[in-house]
Amino acid sequence: MVTVGVLGLQGAVSEHVRSIEACGAKAVVVKKVEQLEDIDGLILPGGESTTMRRLIDRYGFMEPLKSFAASGKPLFGTCAGLILLAKEVVGYENPHLGLMDVTVERNSFGRQVDSFEADLTIKGLDKPFVGVFIRAPHVVKVGEGVEVLAEHDGRIVAAREGQFLGCSFHPELTDDHRFTELFINMVNIAVAV
Ligand code: GLN
């Protein structure tokens, strides 16, 4: 059984734990840098990217997270987590972790509609998936090695680049665990090689 961590500094942490367990993997809430050694893959949850970034700096997670990625282990960013993963954030001079070759824009679905649900067609899933969007970012641009997995209203809302998976919506907030399962499969494969 693989062990998947959820960065537990802020945001929708317990929902991801529930979803990981529903997929039959072991979940760990990562609050200390040392815990990164015990996990095979890591989820960066939704929440508030600026707050999470501040906590990443305060608790010394920046370099350890980069080394975790450099070791080849899979990372999955949802919503604010995707913003943390991105190599570029529109309107910001510097990225946060700057790992995944995508450019994201924050709060990009308009201010009147803060949150909504949409049926998404996602590559790798046979039936539509209900995406829950909460002040969600979208992917403006992808690099060459990035595979677009889903779009909504002509905007990219899910993508994968090798060990990195990212989505604009909150896959952990429904009882449909298929998108989390895609990530668990990535972790399973990474552990096997
Ligand atoms: N708007 C948030 C941000 O920019 C993301 C929202 C979310 O994660 N649900 O960080």
Image (cartoon, helix red, strand yellow):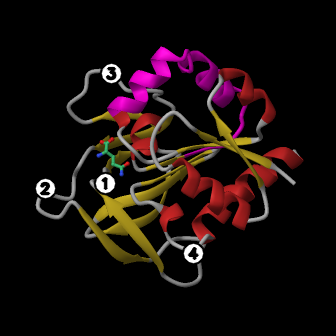
Label 2 CB sits under 8 Å from any ligand 1 atom: no
- Name which residue type carries label 2: Arg
Read off the residue under disc 2.
111
Q: Secondary structure at mark 4?
A: loop
* Whether residue 107 can be seen here: yes
> Is the C-beta of the residue carrying label 4 under 8 Å from the nearest atom of ligand 1?
no
Q: Amino acid at mark 1?
A: Ala
Disc 1 on helix, strand or loop? loop
Q: Earlier in the sequence, mark 2 or mark 1?
A: 2
Assess mark 1: CB under 8 A from ligand 1? yes
User: At label 3, which amino acid type do we have?
Assistant: Asn
Q: Residue drawn at (73%, 28%), measured in percent from left and top?
A: 35
State left or right for residue 152 relative to residue 22: left
Residue at image mark 4: 176
Identify the mark at residue 94; answer none if there is no mark: 3
Q: Is residue 19 above or below residue 107?
A: below
Q: Which of the image's four quarters has the N terminus?
A: bottom right
Distance (Cα) linking label 3 and label 2: 24 Å
Measured as percent of width and height from the top left, residue 127 is found at 54, 84
How would you classify the magenta stretch by its main secondary structure?
Answer: helix
Location of residue 71 (image quadrant) = top right
